[in-house]
Image (cartoon, rainbow, N blue to C red):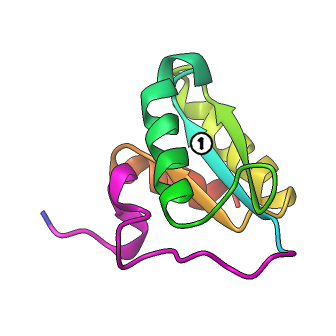
Amino acid sequence: MQRTKSEIPFGHAFDSHGVRAQPAGKVYRIGVLETIPQALNAPNLDALRRGLRERGYVEGKNFVIEYRSADGRADRFPGLATELVRLGVDLLVTRGSSNSGVLLLRGT
């Protein structure tokens, strides 16, 4: 299966060749759009936070996470994606099939 840049697996979004710590001052807003509630997605979010910490990022100091759950309803993805884009997220993270990407594009 061939992947586009926008279809990077969740755990690899911040690999050793990806994000590096940035100068103080900028607070990056990371939008996470998922099908499941945040509590059920805790292991993935913990891994994301840990990866960012390992690269010098501190939650609340130079990044914040805006989490949105579609609660298993794919029809909610476009509206939630639009909401995150309007918030001005610097990065939008989601998992799933290529259909979720199409739904995101329609929402933005």
Quadrant in the picture for the N terminus: bottom left
Residue shown at the point (44%, 42%) measured from the top left: 47
Residue shown at the point (54%, 58%) measured from the top left: 52
Q: In the rendered structure, which amino acid carries the disc numbered 1?
A: Leu
| Magenta residues, start to end | 2-25
Quadrant in the picture for the C terminus: bottom right
User: Which corner quadrant of the image does residue 58 belong to?
Assistant: bottom right
Compared to residue 19, the image places residue 91 above or below, namely above
| Rendered location of residue 103, percent (x, y) | 54, 50
Residue shown at the point (43%, 68%) measured from the top left: 6
Task: Provide the residue designation for mark 1.
Answer: 33
Give the residue at the far left of this rendering.
1
Judge left or right: residue 15 versus residue 46.
left
Compared to residue 37, the image places residue 68 above or below, namely below
| Rendered location of residue 18, percent (x, y) | 43, 76
| Rendered location of residue 25, percent (x, y) | 87, 75
Magenta span contains residue 4: yes
| Rendered location of residue 99, percent (x, y) | 40, 49
Residue 53 versus residue 93: which sits nearer the camera?
A: 53
Q: Main secondary structure of the magenta part?
A: loop
Magenta span contains residue 90: no
> What kind of element bears circle 1?
strand
Judge left or right: residue 59 versus residue 45.
right
Judge left or right: residue 48 versus residue 57.
left
